[in-house]
Image (spheres, rainbow, N blue to C red):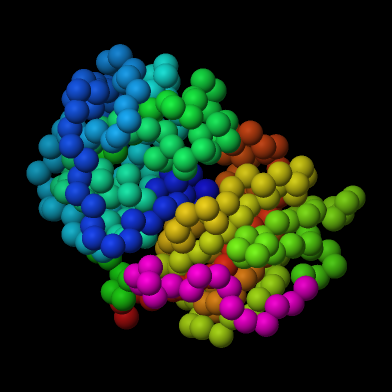
Amino acid sequence: MLALTIAGLAACSGVGGAEPQCAPAGKQSKAVEVAGTFGSLDLALTSDAPERVKSMQRSVLVEGGGEQLKAGDSVQSVVSVFNGEDGERISAESARLSHSDTSSEWIMRAISCATVGDRIAAVLPAGDVYGEGRVLAAGVPGLAEESSLLVVIDLQQAVPGIPGTITKEDLLERAEGERAEPPASFPAVDISESGKPTVTIPEGAPAPDSVQTATLVAGEGEEVRTGDRVYLRSTGTIWRTGEEFESTWAGDPTDYITTGMIPGLSKGLEGQRVGSQVMILVPAADGYGETALAQMGHAGDDVMVFVIDILGAAHPAE
């Protein structure tokens, strides 16, 4: 959820190796019918909810006839996710999806053979999206570990890839450099053997009302600039409750364009160096905002605490 909710999910498990082929059509994906204009955030499922599937099925509901997506491209899209158990829409949002080896396999199997203007329906196991064994943790009412999801993707506009996009083999595994303790007013951080951080909020400490950043490991790599694609591992914790609401340490590194992230993270990451681990405290106004936080099950004024390992950065074309 570092950028947009579905964008985070779309990047939580890179594919690596050879580019996957698009998933085949199947009975469940072929039967999908939705109502709503192309690019709408208010699609409704008008066919029956899909039955559970063991592997991904993909069908093109509307053929766009635009340019074929190429490796390295990103595509501005509207992504609508429906609960396969009851057909209710779980989420709908605009997201920039990446045709790259750092995107999740399910996204690549949905878009790698697509053209701009396509409306794609994908029916797939919920664990392919949320992560195996993590479906219940997503907190979607009625969704079980064995459930399926229906994802409808409207591919609106291709965005050329950034030259020098980094392959997984060239990324750091974790932050590297001299470690420093966070300031006394910041939460404490415990680092596991694998490198995953666990955050402990100081008892009784007031939550910050502005973006604050502390460098926990000082990397010596390239500086992150505005508009860079950054490759990260991260955890997110709610200051008020101490609840960890997201972690990307279970999968491959995620990648985001800094200008497409929530403002607090853009501010906190730009100017840092690759190899660094940073803690960024993000008030609601610089994060997802009151409404989105409430939809995520948090208080509208909650402060989020992110601990982020910066594993690589690719600069835009000059």
Q: Tell me what residue is drawn at x 61 percent, y 55 percent.
A: 235
- Whether 188 is drawn above or below 207: the answer is below
Tell me if residue 168 is in the magenta stretch: yes
Residue range highlighted in magenta: 166-181
Q: Quadrant of residue 150?
A: top left
- Whether 4 is drawn above or below 53: the answer is below
Decide if residue 271 is in sight here. no
The one of 154 and 53 positioned closer to us in this rendering: 53
The one of 234 and 205 positioned closer to us in this rendering: 234
Q: Tell me what residue is drawn at x 27 percent, y 15 percent.
A: 47
The one of 82 and 106 positioned closer to us in this rendering: 106
What predominant SS class does the magenta segment belong to? loop
Q: State the residue lying farthest toward the left.
A: 65
Decide if residue 108 is in sight here. yes
Q: State the residue lying farthest toward the right.
A: 204
Residue 18, percent from left and from top: 24, 60
Q: Tell me what residue is drawn at x 42 percent, y 26 percent.
A: 147
Q: State the residue lying farthest toward the front.
A: 193
Residue 66, percent from left and from top: 12, 48
Q: Tell me what residue is drawn at x 67 percent, y 47 percent.
A: 244
Residue 124, percent from left and from top: 33, 33
Quarter occupied by the C terminus: bottom left
Tell me if residue 93 is in the magenta stretch: no
Residue 283, percent from left and from top: 68, 52
Q: Quadrant of residue 191?
A: bottom right
